[in-house]
Every structure is written in C-alpha cells, then in structure tokens.
Amino acid sequence: MTTTSPYPCAGDDGAADDDHRRRPRRRGEELNEAIYQATIDELAEVGWTDLTMDRIATRAKASKGSLYRRWPSRTELVIDAMRSRQPSYPTPESGDLRTDLLTLLHTIAEHLEGPRGEAMRGLHAEVTRSPELMRTLRTELTDATQPPMMEVLRRGVVRQEVRPGALTPLVAKVGPSLIRQQFLAFGAPIDRQYIEDVVDQVVLPLVIAH
C-alpha cells in the first residue's frame, strides 16, 4: 500500500507549487534566514492571528516540511525569527546626559519603525489576549535596550549628573518602554517631539542629581 506524505515532495527548500529542481538548493543558515525574513514579513502584514506555517513556507519558497523539521510550532519559529532580528544599540557618549538619552531613544525609535517593529505590532493584539504567549516572549526574548540605557546612566553617575539611586534596571526601562508603547499604540513614525518630552518630562526628572 502506498502512503502519502503530509508534506510536499521536495527538497529542503522546495515549495509545494514550485519545482525545486529548477532552483539552487538552500540549506543551513541561508534557508533559515529566508524563513526568518518571511516570518517577520508575514507578522507585519497579517499579525499573529492569521499567521500560518503555510503562509510562511510559501513566502520563503520553502516546504512546510523544512519548517516543521526545525520548529514544532509557529510560536517557536516566531521567537527564533524575532531573536534573529534583535537589534544592537551602541551606547552614545557625548559627555552630556540629555544628549545621550535623546540619541539612544531616537535610535530605539528608528529600529521600531523597521520590519521587526511592525512584526511586534502584529503580535501585540494576540499577546494581550494570551498570557501564555506573553510569558513565553518575556522569557525567551531579552530587552536589548537595557544595557545601553544602564551604561548611559552609569556614565551620568560618574559625571555626577545622575543620582546613584537611579542606576537600576527598573529606571533604565522607563524611557524605552514609553517609546515602545507609543509605537504599539500609534504606529510609525514616532513623533520626535514626543521623544524629547519623554526625556525632558520623565527621564531627566527621574534620574537627575540635585
């Protein structure tokens, strides 16, 4: 008796409706990168609710089998895709606290306005309805904004611009969290005056050494 595979009869990157033998075969990091990008693009376009492995496979020109062999579910795939796009924020060092805060928060805003930020917006509505998904994302994805914010504040303490008691992870989250919330609520672009207001009306009064 002949059995039928649930996946397309193709190589690692063969899409169901495409003869993979006509295209160069992708493996390893090249294939993973195509799948990650397709995942980010799909999240930005349709959000979590309508995100499917089928759509991602079609967009990446890969077989569903190649996805399921790597990731048992879309949650694991989304986490890896988001992690692959984790930004790296350089720590500004102008010698002035306000200038460094503005520079860093502007950089954070620019990253949010890119594909990864749009993917975050696609996840946001579902996260508010799914505590389990929220816990998973918080556990698996680190906040890349905290180390540079802590370093900006630390240098401010050294220059006696920042009170030592403000050098805590909780305080470091305040500015980036307000920028992130503004983006999730209203999308891109993030108003530059809003970023200045966050620095002048919230962060500086919270950390400044009197």
Image (tube, rainbow, N blue to C red):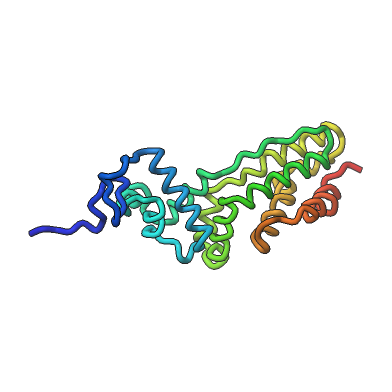
In this rendering, is residue 194 above or below 167? below
Does residue 87 appear to the left or right of 194 in the view shown? left
Q: Residue furthest right?
A: 210
Q: Which is nearer the eye, 52 or 69?
A: 52
What percent of the width, then of the height, locates residue 43?
50, 58
Q: Which is nearer the eye, 96 or 19?
A: 19
Badge count: 0
From the image, which quarter does the C terminus lie in?
Answer: top right
Residue at (48%, 66%) from the top-left corner?
49
Residue at (42%, 48%) from the top-left corner?
35
Q: Which is nearer the eye, 57 or 133?
A: 57
Task: Classify residue 184 by image quadrant.
Answer: bottom right
In this rendering, is residue 154 above or below 64? above
Does residue 103 appear to the left or right of 76 in the view shown? right
In this rendering, is residue 176 above or below 121? above
What percent of the width, then of the height, locates residue 84?
50, 43
Q: Which residue lies furthest to the bottom in this view?
A: 129
Residue at (69%, 50%) from the top-left corner?
109
Residue at (24%, 58%) from the top-left corner?
6
What percent of the width, then of the height, locates residue 52?
41, 61
From the image, which quarter does the N terminus lie in?
Answer: bottom left
In this rendering, is residue 146 above or below 58? above
Does residue 183 appear to the left or right of 57 in the view shown? right
Q: Residue furthest left?
A: 1
What percent of the width, then of the height, locates residue 166?
79, 44
Does residue 10 appear to the left or right of 98 in the view shown? left
